Image: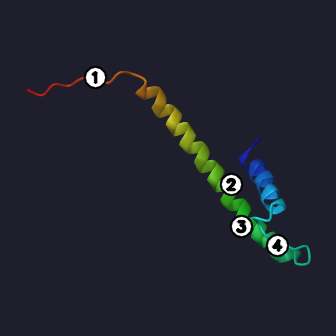
């Protein structure tokens, strides 16, 4: 599932829980609000994926024992 699909599913859950306002009487305004939330969710998911990938890459590198350097 890509970030857009995940963001959409999260937004639907947040709407159902009342965390994102949605007024059927004002579809235009509700769609604008939903669009902003979807953009923020997609960005957060992308950042999270980048952070996880970076952490995994660093974790693989940090599994090696550090070399000891002696300064005389």
Q: Earlier in the sequence, mark 2 or mark 3?
A: 3
For the rendered model, the colour scheme is rainbow
Query: Residue pushed farthest front?
Result: 17
Q: Is residue 52 left or right of residue 12?
A: left
Is the residue marked by circle 3 packed among few (<14), some (14-19), or many (20+) residues within 10 Å?
A: few
- Where residue 3 appears, as percent x and y from the top left, is 71, 48
- Where residue 22 appears, as percent x and y from the top left, is 83, 70
Is the residue marked by circle 1 packed among few (<14), some (14-19), or many (20+) residues within 10 Å?
A: few
Dot label at residue 42: 2
Q: Earlier in the sequence, mark 3 or mark 1?
A: 3
User: What is the secondary structure assignment of the residue under circle 1?
Assistant: loop
What whole-number distance in Å separates the C-alpha atoms at marks 3 and 1?
48 Å
Which of the 4 quarters of the picture holds residue 35?
Answer: bottom right
Q: Residue at position x 76%, y 53% from top? A: 10
- Where residue 39 appears, as percent x and y from the top left, is 69, 61
Q: Quadrant of the C terminus?
A: top left
Dot label at residue 30: 4
Number of marks in picture? 4
Q: Earlier in the sequence, mark 2 or mark 4?
A: 4
Q: Residue at position x 58%, y 50% from top? A: 47
Dot label at residue 36: 3
- The residue that label 1 is drawn on is 67
Q: Quadrant of the N terminus?
A: top right
Is the residue marked by circle 2 packed among few (<14), some (14-19), or many (20+) residues within 10 Å?
A: some
Q: Residue at position x 24%, y 23% from top? A: 68
Query: Is label 1 in contact with label 4 (beta carbons under 8 Å)?
Result: no
């Amino acid at each position: 599932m890509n970030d857009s699909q995940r963001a959409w599913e999260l937004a639907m859950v947040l709407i159902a829980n009342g965390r994102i306002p949605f007024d059927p009487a004002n579809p235009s305004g509700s769609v604008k609000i939903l669009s902003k939330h979807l953009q923020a969710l997609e960005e957060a998911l992308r950042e999270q994926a980048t952070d996880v990938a970076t952490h995994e890459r660093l974790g693989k590198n940090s599994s090696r024992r550090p070399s000891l350097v002696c300064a005389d």
